[in-house]
Image (cartoon, grey):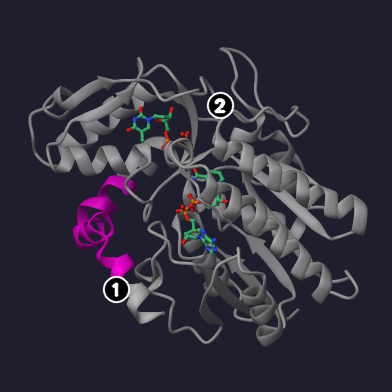
Amino acid sequence: MKKNILITGGAGFIGSHVVRLFVNKYPNYQIINFDKLTYAGNLANLTDIEKQPNYTFVKGDIQNKHALEKVFKTHQITDVIHLAAESHVDRSISGPMDFILTNIVGTANLLEVSRARWSKFDHHIFYHISTDEVYGSLGEEGFFLEDTPYDPRSPYSASKASSDHLVRAYFHTYGMPVKLSNCSNNYGSHQFPEKLVPLMINNIKTNKSLPIYGKGDNVRDWLWVEDHARAIDVIFHKGKLGETYNIGGWNEWTNINLVKALCRIMDEKLNRPIGTSQKLITFVKDRAGHDMRYAIDATKIKNELGWTPSITFKDGLEKTVDWYLSNTQWLDNVTSGAYEKYYSEKYL
Ligand code: NAD
Ligand code: TYD
């Protein structure tokens, strides 16, 4: 079946992996990547597929409803996979308004334009990508399930929780054909080096200190980004309307143990004596309201849709380190703001 799919945030970390997968796997689908190109998104992430006939880039802001109306009309959008967001917890603590405007108002704009353009809801899908952080913070035991009550604690997670509620409200009130998924922490290539894994790789490479918040005993569940993209593909095609699917790696690590594992891999790859990188670890002031533990129970997506993670954490981390070590120009360009400047001048 032919589809014209609007993927928002397709120039970002997870979005670029989803765009690549859909463009390559579904030549019948037109993929329209709608992205504002903030500091976190750049088109260098997609150079391998940018010339494919079923791919189009449109620079735009989901805060701008008219821009969304225009892209829906021009490209006769049939489906939405919504990833565009402000995504970094630390930035949401220092400046929450961008999170409120993009994540809440932007999602509301997208829902409103979809509702207005899709006169009948048959054959359309509005798929909203969200995070496990909406469920709050776990103690030592237990897992987040799809029916775990929401308890967001950072401006980022509160803005994502709010957008999730709006998406569900459009399903119940208007019959909008929605799907949602809430995923754990992703790692892999093309992630902006402010998040834990790429920040640590970049700092080890450049011999800078490795800032660990608090004692480093906070726990996150890590998933290979390409496995997240595969899960999104499966949910988009086989997930039930109105339903939510939790996606996770069954892969919990304390921050300190994860950083130590990265130090070891980096020592090996850089031919440094084992233990060299670990000396860079520095314990710093804890993040305000730092959630203690996230852990996903991904039984529903496994049993109902047959999805499971495809690679081990060891292999995934090695691949990730290899990618950052062989893409030093990309790292330099994102950290210096060179891509942001280049693409904002190219797409005014
Ligand atoms: P990212 O920050 O790497 O990318 C976000 C993208 O959205 C960028 O390309 C940016 O330019 C674009 N964008 C930001 N504001 C926009 C706006 N107003 N209009 C249009 N485009 C805009 O984020 P990511 O880590 O790839 O996350 C993508 C989605 O997945 C987000 O919705 C996030 O909440 C969710 N998520 C992320 C993780 C994770 O571990 N990174 C885990 C679970 C869910
Ligand atoms: P992050 O990658 O920002 O993802 P999130 O906050 O969405 O889970 O952080 C992952 C964990 O690593 C989190 O517990 C905070 C911690 N952290 C540090 O200890 N030092 C750092 O420099 C960063 C960026 C994160």
Q: Label 1 crowding class (10 Å Cα cut-off): few <14, some 14-19, many 20+?
A: few
- Main SS class of the magenta portion in the image: helix
Position of residue 83 measured from the top left corner of the image (x, y, whole percent): 58, 57
CB-based contact (under 8 Å), mark 2 and mark 1? no
Going by the numbered disc 2, the residue's amino acid type is Tyr
Position of residue 168 measured from the top left corner of the image (x, y, whole percent): 81, 48
Q: Quadrant of the C terminus?
A: bottom left
Q: Quadrant of residue 345?
A: bottom left
Q: CA distance from mark 2 to mark 1?
A: 37 Å
Residue in the image at 72% along x and 49% along y: 180
Residue in the image at 58% along x and 13% along y: 139
Q: Which residue is mark 1?
A: 342
Position of residue 15 measured from the top left corner of the image (x, y, whole percent): 51, 60
Q: Which residue is mark 2?
A: 294
Residue in the image at 32% along x and 47% along y: 193
Magenta residues, start to end: 319-341
Task: Indicate whether 346 appears above or below 145.
Answer: below
